[in-house]
Amino acid sequence: MSHPFSTLSPDVVMSAIESVGIWPVGEPFALNSYENRVLMFRDEDGGRWVVKFYRPERWSNEAIQEEHDFLTEVAQAGVPVVAPWRDDQHASLHTFETFRFTLFPQCSGQAPELDDPAQLFALGEVLGQLHEVAARRPFHHRETLRLGPDVSDAERRVVASPWLNDHQVRAYQRVVGKIRERLDDVAVDADSMIRTHGDCHLGNVLGREGAFKLVDFDDCLTAPAIQDVWMLLPVEQPQQWRAQLSEMVEGYEETRPFPHQKMSLIEPLRAYRLIRHAAWLVDRWEDPAFPRAFPWLAEAGYWDQHIRQLEQQLLHLESPLWLA
């Protein structure tokens, strides 16, 4: 079976870009991206661009357009994000042959330094600004985070894969079942759900001299605001966690109140991501980019480690690190 990007040759990439009236100089350079295909190039005027070719059949056109419109809305409100380029007809989603693609101005820079209080403050300030705009209206076509049901779906996909032996399947189902029971007890009230970045880790924050921009809203969804906070502080030392978070909170509250009352969602959201990430790898194995990048998925040792990680996360659900 051919993978979704089997016909996305360099010639197709060049022709797609030229079809919207932008003329690349030299061959585009592929960036590290697995879900989609993302390439960087320069145009004949020296402008720097990123072109994203969307994975076929993942998102509907309406869902992609809603991502673009969200980015344009928050950019126009002064929030530092990278919004998509639009042509003379104001279109941001383009089609060439069987592929849908979008162009973005290139954003250069580096991730925040978490040991710098000023950068943590600036990062919190950006998130507060984003959520202030995000809370004004809902998504209609993007996904909504559902803790228990989404974990159950991910579990089914992992168990149906060929990678786990019988012992691992039993151990995996046992720990995921216990985690799911915990997640089913987690109350996420509708009033706390807003439009979020959805995948807000340090790799998706770029900037220079403390001025940061948020990039890659491909996974934007309706979720609690804390979803865009917890991945930015991947530390296990509680004292360091609290110190870094306090700086971010100060910046965040320059615009809106920080959702302190939703801190209890951090460990459930971490468990949710761990389980869903493994299922995502399993789902994408037919794409040749995945065996090259994640060869350890087919090894028994990975699944033993993943199960131990889930067992550790179950303990964190009972005694959250951020309360330590």
Image (cartoon, helix red, strand yellow):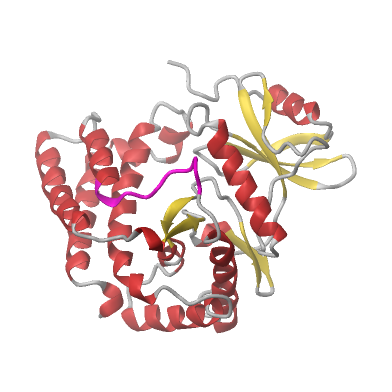
Judge from the rendering whether residue 256 lies leftward or rightward of residue 283; answer left or right: right
Residue segment shown in magenta: 139-148
> Is 280 drawn above or below residue 195 in the view shown?
above
> Does residue 207 show up?
yes
Could you tell me which residue is drawn at 55 percent across and 25 percent down?
5
Judge from the rendering whether residue 193 lies leftward or rightward of residue 43; answer left or right: left
Pick whichever, 88 or 245, lies toward us: 88
Could you tell me which residue is drawn at 23 percent across and 44 percent down?
303
Judge from the rendering whether residue 216 lies leftward or rightward of residue 270; answer left or right: right
Q: Quadrant of the N terminus?
A: top left
Q: Does the segment drawn in magenta span residue 147?
A: yes
Percent x, y for residue 93? 67, 35
Judge from the rendering whether residue 213 lies leftward or rightward of residue 143; answer left or right: right
Percent x, y for residue 126? 59, 69
Could you tell me which residue is drawn at 54 percent across and 83 percent down?
117
Q: Does the segment drawn in magenta span residue 141?
A: yes
Percent x, y for residue 171? 11, 45
Pick whichever, 219 or 321, lies toward us: 219
> Does residue 308 show up?
no
